[in-house]
Amino acid sequence: MIVELIPPENDDVDRLITCDGCGIEYSYEHYKILADLNKLAYFYGEEVGITCHTCLFSYGRFLAETSDKECYKIEVVAEDDNHILKFHKNA
């Protein structure tokens, strides 16, 4: 699965961003503050929609447990770099 990091910068700071998984919702102004403190990240992927980091990690653990593979990988595409998240069975 591939997801993109949603950058917290937005011209409309009052616009809300909501996790499709748990419903946690912040304005872009507050999202930027929390993201700058490494407390919150939102991602977008076709399979998960808009999701917060907590729901993304929960989904990754679920996929690892239900997958035939020993390790399930999620690629995170960010502006400056790409990262691979690895989820192992029984982790």
Image (cartoon, rainbow, N blue to C red):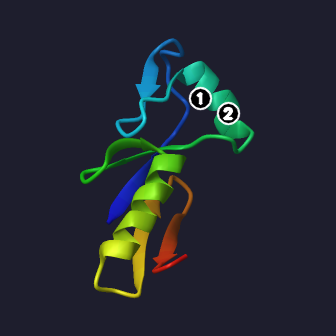
Residue at 38 percent across and 74 percent down: it is 65
- Look at the picture and state if 91 lies above or below 31: below
Disc 1 marks a residue whose amino acid type is: Tyr
Horizontal side of residue 44 vs 35, given as left or right: left
The quadrant of the rendering that contains the C terminus is bottom right
Q: Position of residue 60 (x, y in %)?
A: 42, 64
Q: State which quadrant residue 35 falls in.
A: top right
Residue 34 badge: 2
Q: Position of residue 8 (x, y in %)?
A: 55, 33
Horizontal side of residue 91 vs 51, given as left or right: right
Residue at 40 percent across and 58 percent down: it is 59
The image shows a total of numbered marks equal to 2
- Look at the picture and state if 66 lies above or below 45: below
- Look at the picture and state if 65 lies above or below 70: above
- Look at the picture and state if 21 lies above or below 68: above
Q: Which residue does the numbered mark 1 point to in the structure image?
A: 31
Labelled pair 2, 1 in contact (Cβ < 8 Å)? yes
